[in-house]
Image: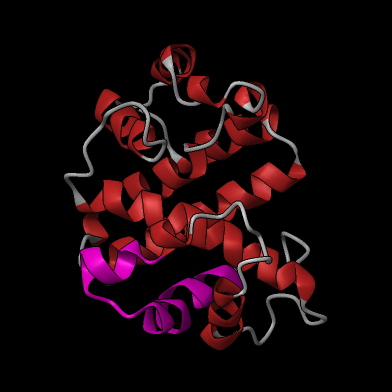
């Protein structure tokens, strides 16, 4: 079965720097979310799913409906990713008709958008991720011109699905997780 080292190697092999950075942040956030909601026994699963969720994005960007489609499913199965993990990855797309019927699926949808948005906010700050607080992120969420392609509704799903205030999730869970890898991804 796949492990963190192999998942990271697959991403480095197939993805450019920006996409690798995004996927590393989603992986960190998924792990932190797993711990937050009490699923610590599944940290590796949550991390690996976060790491692999967009592995085909650069290949499918011109035809997004192929994102996480048959070709990717076949590839991931060949790389020893369990089929039920692939279903979670497909759930984050929205067009594969995979219901958001588990915490891990709901988390991936919200965390994917939140992670990308937090990195975008950090890239605009002089100190990048260093000292970043929820206030900075929430201010940019309200700015409809900033990262306008990011679905604000998906980012706010954490409040609905997990009964966690966004500011609390950012300050207590996600931003500390991102700080652990900020240097590695040129965000200091």
Q: What residue is shown at x 51% (from left), y 77% (from top)?
A: 176
Residue 43 picture location, percent across and down: 33, 54
Magenta stretch: dominant secondary structure? helix
How is the rendered protein coloured?
A: secondary structure
Q: On the image, which quarter does residue 32 sit in?
A: bottom left
**Residue 94 horizontal/vertical position (percent):** 37, 36
Foreground residue among 177 and 91: 91
Can residue 42 be seen in this snapshot? Answer: no
Q: Which residues are magenta?
A: 156-179
Q: Residue at x 60, y 67 (%)?
A: 118
- Residue 69 versus residue 14: which sits nearer the camera? 69
Image quadrant containing the N terminus: top left
Residue at 29% across, 71% down: 159
Question: Is 56 situated above or below 99?
Answer: above
Question: For residue 102: magenta?
Answer: no
Could you tell me if residue 62 is visible in this image?
yes
> Which residue of the protein is positioned furthest toward the left in this rendering?
101
Question: Which quadrant of the figure contains the C terminus?
Answer: bottom right
């Amino acid at each position: 079965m796949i492990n963190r080292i192999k998942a990271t190697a697959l991403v480095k092999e197939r993805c450019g720097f920006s996409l690798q950075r995004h996927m590393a942040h989603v992986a960190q956030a998924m792990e932190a979310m797993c711990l937050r909601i009490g699923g610590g026994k599944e940290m590796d699963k949550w991390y690996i799913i976060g790491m692999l969720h967009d592995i085909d994005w650069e290949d499918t960007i011109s035809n997004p409906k192929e994102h996480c489609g048959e070709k990717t499913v076949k590839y991931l199965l060949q790389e020893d990713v369990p089929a039920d993990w692939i279903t979670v990855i497909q759930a984050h797309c929205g067009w594969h008709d995979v219901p958001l019927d588990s915490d891990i699926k709901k988390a991936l949808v919200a965390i994917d958008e939140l992670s990308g948005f937090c990195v975008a906010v950090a890239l605009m700050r002089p100190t990048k991720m260093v000292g970043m607080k929820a206030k900075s992120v929430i201010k940019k969420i309200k700015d409809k011109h900033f990262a306008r392609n990011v679905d604000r509704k998906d980012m706010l799903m954490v409040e609905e699905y997990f009964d966690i205030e966004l500011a609390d999730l950012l300050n207590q869970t996600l931003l500390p997780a991102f700080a652990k890898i900020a240097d590695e991804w040129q965000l200091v």
